Amino acid sequence: MTRLLATFVWLLSGGGGAALAQTPVAPPAAGFNVTAITFFVFFVALTLAITYWAAGRTRSAADYYAASGQISSTQNGFALAGDLISAGAFLGLSGLIFGTGFDGLVYAVGYTLGYPLIVFFFADQLRRLGKYTFSDVIAFRLAPRPVRTLAALSSLSIVAFYLIAQLVGAGQLIQLLFGLPYLYAVLGVGALMICYVMFGGMVATTWVQIIKAILLLCAATFTALLVLAHFGFSYERIIAQAVEVHAKHSAILQPSTFAASPWSTVSLALALFVGAAGLPHLLMRVFTVPDARAARTSTFWGCTIVAYFFSLIFVIGFGGLAIVGSTPAYLGANGAPIGGGNMVAIHLSHALGGNVLLGLNSAIGFATILAVVSGLTLAASSAVSHDLYANVLKRGSASDADEVRVAKYATLGVGIAAVLLGIAFEKQNIAYMVGLAFSISASSNFPVLILAMYWKDFTTRGAVVGGSVGLVSALVLTILGPPVWLKVLGFAQPIFPLDPPTLITLPLALATCVIVSILDRSA
């Protein structure tokens, strides 16, 4: 099997992959990579063709927001998985494992465990009660205008952090392979995502996600097999080599960072576990299938695909540490990977398969980012057009045409804001930034949504006050904590120590929702 894989890579890379059984091939020259660009152009052309096709099928608000509920459960399962398997998973987690070892795996486990919560508690109820967005569900039994306003503001905050992570990954990837400045790279990705959502809506976004998920699963599987083949299909040898090359040696097999701050670890686990159930772009997928049964089935397939992918990250992450970490040509003067920690998976691809595998995995990583940012942008524009414009400002009297028009304008505004934020957060690890989005989701959307569906005494005032407390406290404590105060603003010490603040903000939001609802005497 090892010889078969080695021969296959050798054929793909014109002989360059023969080094698979011995040492990694030399890294590519910095800047223009013709093989990668060829794959990039192909995937961009393919996604634009899908957008053109979808534009002809997007005529109403139902088409734009939810593909008129005509996506099958299997298709939606792949699209759901595609929404969660983002650049933060493929690129960011590999970088985290390269830097911290075991600690990086906590994110992979956390992302995986959050999905079943949607299956068991949310999918069925959301599909029965909602129309386009999760705010339809809480507005079903509470006063629509205040709760929709809260839901829209919360969704926009979550999407902002998630979009930052994707754009940072895209910018660093294009900068490394094309030799373009980071600024131009982010601008290019922003332009593409605006195009997909403005013209193709949910139909285009779904099919881009499906294709991207299939390609990413194949690429991750193949890369993991090559890593195993390189070490004689012995995971023990991978770990041994990773321990040998890392500066902390065997300490990377222990929860070093998390052990030093156990309360932050518990807070992170809580954010990852319940945060997925409040992510607006994931919840929107429940409305793209015909009925509640299809919603349950699609989330089951999503869980299965996500679990399989993150199991591959265990191999790819430590394989990247073992191979890239032991090859000086892939490392800068300070010992960090060239292009940043987010590029470990890309360097690993080149080490195992030369320019062909590097180009293929880079293009798939780029397609991953494009697909995820499209779903996020659609969720943000829906919050503006469907919740704020159609139901708050127009009180439900807006026509389909007006609503879709506002959604397209909102897409443009969200895209511009996302590009500016992506430029500001250039140096952040993308898996880490996704974790912050989960934290805000867990503190704002999750408490309101679960209480609205399962507690009959929940009131509008309880939802608005509790949700606002969760949202504001999560944002303020994130800014005052290590993510922004220390790493972005450059202060010596954070004002608030927990990172993320979910351990404080989630109980605070839930308690406020319950107490205000109990004390509320309104109808």
Image: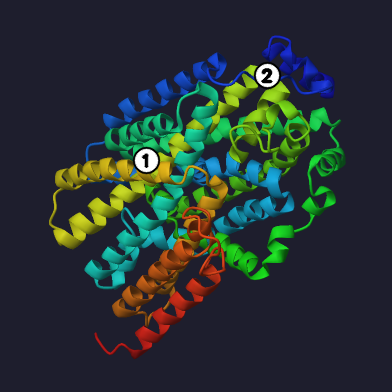
- Element type where label 2 sits in the image: helix
Q: How crowded is mark 1: few (under 14 residues within 10 Å), some or many (20 or more)?
A: many
Residue 7 lies, in percent from the top left, at 78, 15
- Element type where label 1 sits in the image: helix
Q: Horizontally, is 144 left or right of 307 in the view? A: left
How are the residues colored? rainbow
User: Which corner quadrant holds the C terminus?
Assistant: bottom left
Confirm whether residue 222 shows in the render. no
Compared with residue 209, is residue 174 higher up or lower down, i.e. above or below?
A: above
The residue shown at (36%, 31%) is: 192
Q: Residues within 10 Å of mark 2 (few under 14, many from 20)?
A: many
Task: Check contact, mark 1 vs mark 2: CB within 8 A.
Answer: no
User: Gap in Å between the C-alphas at discs 1 and 2?
Assistant: 32 Å
Compared with residue 415, is residue 363 higher up or lower down, i.e. above or below?
A: above
The residue shown at (52%, 74%) is: 504
Compared with residue 159, is residue 192 higher up or lower down, i.e. above or below?
A: above
**As rendered, which of 215 and 164 lies closer to the eye?**
164
For disc 1, the marked residue is 419
Which residue type carries mark 2? Gly
Q: Horizontally, is 162 left or right of 28 in the view? A: left
Which residue type carries mark 1? Val
| 1 or 2: tag closer to the N-terminus | 2
Residue 110 lies, in percent from the top left, at 62, 57
For disc 2, the marked residue is 354
Confirm whether residue 189 shows in the render. yes
Mark 1 or 2: the one toward you: 1
Residue 17 lies, in percent from the top left, at 74, 17
Residue 168 lies, in percent from the top left, at 48, 40
**As rendered, which of 188 and 79 lies closer to the eye?**
188
